[in-house]
Image: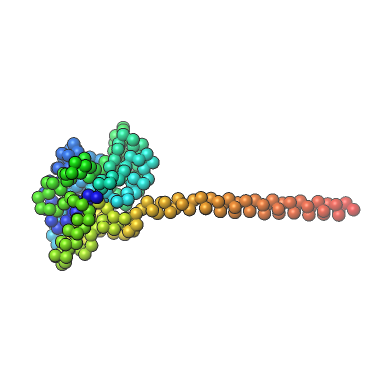
Amino acid sequence: MRALLIDVPKCVGCGACVAACCEQNGLPLEDSAELAPHHYTVVRKLRTRRGEVYYRRLCMHCLDPACASVCPVGALKKTSQGPVVYDPSICMGCRYCLQACPFDVPRYEWDSRAPKLGKCSFCAERLAEGGVTACAQVCPTGATVCGERDDLLREARSRIAAEPGKYVPRIYGEREVGGTSVLYISHVPFGILGLPENLPPEPLPNFTQRALSQIPPLVGSAGLILAGLWWLTNRKHEVARKESAESAREGSR
């Protein structure tokens, strides 16, 4: 499975990845720090005590994506090569994917009469032909590298081990929500890069499946409870009627 390794300290903010993404996908090249239906990846800048920090944001391409699990028509799918791809021709515009994504990535064309979703496609066509993503191909510093996920995890560990005082001792995306196909290593906390740090290591669709699996027994139990309450209520009414009838007969004697 293919993946991207983003090495935050190596990013110089040149924007070559953004330009390559726009060219690859036929998108307008505009200066933006926010993801949008026509901005699949952006480079942001932070000012910290360690100086200026540049970093990319894009779809994380989860190994078990929540967006695909909630899509009722299969417009979002995880491919065997790594990308989570989107088919606008069958999208019904329900926007469940926006709510399900733990990384707040998908963007919706709110101002369009025929709105669709916008997000990074991981250059699925290029990967299918044996190539690398457009952003990785043009990166001049090695801040974005495309390769096999296992190889990139080894590379990330090697870079961290070689400069232990430089990097946060963690690979973001290795285990978050079951793992992602976009991996980060950084010299600043991941939280300030806008990456949530409180995510479980288990894929989010598993939580949904467990909840749904409880519905049949819960419905059955609720049915038994309601049936029992109905019987008790009717039994009380029946007893009350008999007692009332007996009292009436005794009073007539």
Q: In this view, does 166 lie to the left or right of 198?
A: left
Q: Residue furthest left?
A: 140
Looking at the image, which is closer to me, 46 or 7? 7
- Give whichever of 118, 252 is nearer the camera: 118
User: Is 17 or 147 nearer to us in this picture?
Assistant: 147
Identify the coloring: rainbow
Tell me which corner region of the image, top left, top right, bottom left or bottom right, holds residue 8.
bottom left
- Is residue 148 among what the camera can see? yes
Taking the spot 19% from the left edge, 56% from the top edge, the residue there is: 151
Q: Locate residue 107 relative to residue 228 in the image: left or right.
A: left
Give the side of residue 142 with respect to residue 224, left or right.
left
Residue 136 location (% of width, % of height) = 15, 48
Q: Looking at this rendering, what residue extends furthest in the bottom direction?
A: 165
Residue at 26% over, 57% down: 174
Image location of residue 211, percent across then percent down: 44, 53
Q: In this view, does 160 lie above or below 132?
A: below
- In percent of the image, x 20 and y 63: which residue is there? 168
Q: Where is residue 44 in the image (x, y as percent from the top left)?
A: 18, 51
